[in-house]
Image: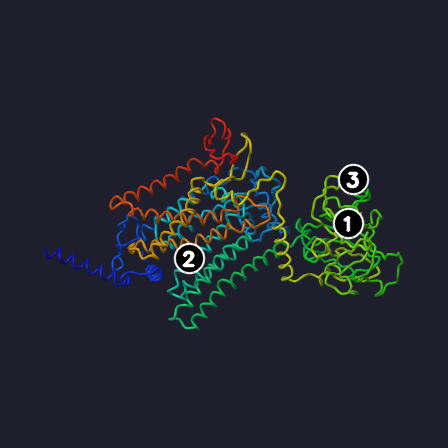
Amino acid sequence: MAKEECMTQSTTTRDTSTLRNRRTGPTSSREALQALEDSQAAGLSPEDDTQSSNGTSHHLSAGGHVSRDPQSGGVVLMLVAGLSFATRLYRITEPPHVCWDETHFGKMGSYYINRTFFFDVHPPLGKMLIGLAGYMTGYDGSFPFAKPGDKYEHHNYWGMRGLCAVLGSFLPIFAYLIVLNLSRSYTAALITATLVICDTGCITISQYILLDPILLFFIMAAVLSMVNFSLQRFRPFTSSWWLWLILTGVNLAGALGVKFVGLFVVLLVGLNTVWDLWRLLGDLSLSLVEITKHFLARIVGLILVPLFLYVTIFAVHFVVLNKSGPGDGFYSSAFQSRLIGNNLHNASMPEYLAYGSIITVKNLRIAGGYLHSHWHLYPEGVGARQQQVTAYLHKDYNNVWLVHRPDNNASQPGTADLVRHGDIIRLEHKETTRNLHGHLHEAPLTKKHFQVTGYGIVEVCGGRKGDLVKVLRSKVRFLHRATGCVLYSSGKTLPKWGWEQVEVTCSPYLKETPSSQWNIEDHVNPKWPNISLSVLKPHFLEILLESHIVMIRGNSGLKPKDNEMNSKPWHWPIDYQGLRFSGVNDTEYRVYLLGNPVVWWMNLASLGLYPIMVAVASIALQRGFSLGQKRKEHSLVLQREGGLLLLGWLLHYAPFYTMGRVLYFHHYFPAMLFSSMLTGITFDVLLKSTDLLLRPPYSDWLRRLGLLVLLLSVLYSFYLFHPLSYGMTGPLAHEPGSAMAGQKWMDSWEF
């Protein structure tokens, strides 16, 4: 009897201590939020109500969930890591031929090994890492990556695939840790990790030489660093606080350095930081000096450090790629003059354009080309049947023109012999001796533009009348004197009769655009002294700015090629249509990028369920319903931490509805990871709500059964659809004997 009284008294003391530490229970959303923050800072788990006052805990809470036990947590993390690496590294050398966009990014890795300059619409970090991985594993950069299906044969391609697979293997690990740190629930973290590990889409996109696994690695690493930094808020300016702050900035630079869509995670971290600073501003225990220190620390860690690293990435890019290559023509003549092997490198020519000069003229738009002509005439029915004038993307003797006065009168060398802004000139095509000409006939392709088959006034853009035209550096426009239109490269490809070169028109729209701006590139005139072009080479900030302008214009101008598979943003969350990575018929090795439909539709369901659950919980808290301490904490985790993940999903998904460029299914994968993490938290809170329907122990049994059914459903769906990732041969899905027989649940799937 005495022993029982002692135990009762001890229990009462413990409960009283627990209640005192919780301030007798929060009575409002604000107080509950503060209580949750305090418990998280102390390392407590909201789902474990059996935490004792001395900091020890049981292995299982009353609800049957694993508590925050370091040993069991380490085992689960090791299991997640093992399964993640096993599923991503399995058969990465298959198929032994080029798959889908490996033809682009494998080739670009080769360019880095060979130090050959190229153009791409994305920042360089991802391709640099691919090239480095290939170089470190013995690849010599000699494979051409000409087209999908080309056999790798003796070339060491596994290192480049291996890098992508290893980085992709960290995604389930990062997702697990993010959800664990946000929710303090092993159940939520386990659900999330299972979804990402068993997603066939995440596996497929991680096993090939692509930018996506590298991008996803940095996005998830940035989010994990941001979450861990937030957990250090009660220990400001400690070494761990600085570590996670700096790591957040480093990973932001990495995400943006791979693709411009890394801006979305930058925006997510920025909004979270603004909220964090707003909260600090409302903390009256902090002085203005301390708040200023917090503000400056975030400027250093989240702005200056990422900016420095991002610029450094481009500095390395420009140093490594110092040889002339296929990307030269996309950049200005001044930019090209710094590339070894380019005809402008270490060249010398007269500095100012003069009459009697032999020149080439380059358009300033991306892929605008060189002003070009040849003996061929426009066909019947296409304007006047006169000599074609086009733009050509490559160096060619038919790009050469002579600069004359309109009256053909020559003059002795002197300042009067230099071409100035506002002068009337005549351009003669050197090879055919025809003059550049324009008239009011309709252009071949561009409506409301006129055909080009001679021009008058030359304008220096932004210059004053009488300014000299500087080779390489001056942006000029050619204004036709008779019609008032300007020489224009439309960027459109002419039909076979135009040798599939770029259309040149006379545009009546006089607004200054890169399509109507040109520069003088090659310049020969024996009457005038040459200067070394090294004095005209642009400095680092100029080439950095130009490279970004070219990338952004190129990205926005991406259009689908003939018969190329592209998709719409509304297709993505419902897993409407995938992408063929390899093979089409029953004799080929087929790989098809498609999300595990059970995982993706579960994510879609949670996106619909989440706002309903938040609305119900918010109304209950606002109306003061007695939910109990544990359920209040669960509701706040759902609202705040779930809200952060929902914001991440929206930021990585909604902007695609505003984009005019071509879109593909793989663009959704960053958003998919956020929706998977949101699913983990949403379903965890839903499972914990079974006690609203049944009383213990029946509610615990229902919770465990629900979790088991959920996990087994995901695992079984992975078993059904894993051939999509690891490859299929033999009969197609609609044929008997196929590995995917009966699995084509939607007609839009093309495996």
Q: Secondary structure at mark 3?
A: loop
Instruction: Give the residue pinned by disc 2.
Output: 227
In the image, which is nearer the foreground, mark 2 or mark 3?
3
Give the residue type at disc 3: Gly
Q: Secondary structure at mark 2?
A: helix
Q: Are marks 3 and 1 in contact (CB under 8 Å)?
A: no
Count of labels in the image: 3
Mark 3–mark 1 distance (CA, rounded to whole Å): 26 Å
| Horizontal relation, residue 552 to residue 370: left or right | left
**Which mark is first along the chain, 3 or 2?**
2
Give the residue type at disc 1: Asn
Where residue 723 sits: x, y (%)?
47, 35
Where residue 88 sits: x, y (%)?
46, 43
**Which mark is first along the chain, 1 or 2?**
2
**Which mark is first along the chain, 1 or 3?**
3
Q: Nearer the viewer, residue 264 or 357?
A: 264
In the image, which is nearer the foreground, mark 2 or mark 1?
2
Q: For the N terminus, give its image quadrant.
A: bottom left
Instruction: Give the residue pinned by disc 1.
Output: 399
Instruction: Give the residue pinned by disc 3.
Output: 381
The image's mark for residue 269 is none
Specify the color scheme.
rainbow
Mark 2–mark 3 distance (CA, rounded to whole Å): 65 Å
Give the residue type at disc 2: Val
Q: Report whether residue 42 is seen.
A: no
Q: Are marks 2 and 1 in contact (CB under 8 Å)?
A: no
What is the crowding at mark 3: few (fewer than 14 residues within 10 Å), some, or many (at least 20)?
A: few
In the image, which is nearer the foreground, mark 3 or mark 1?
3
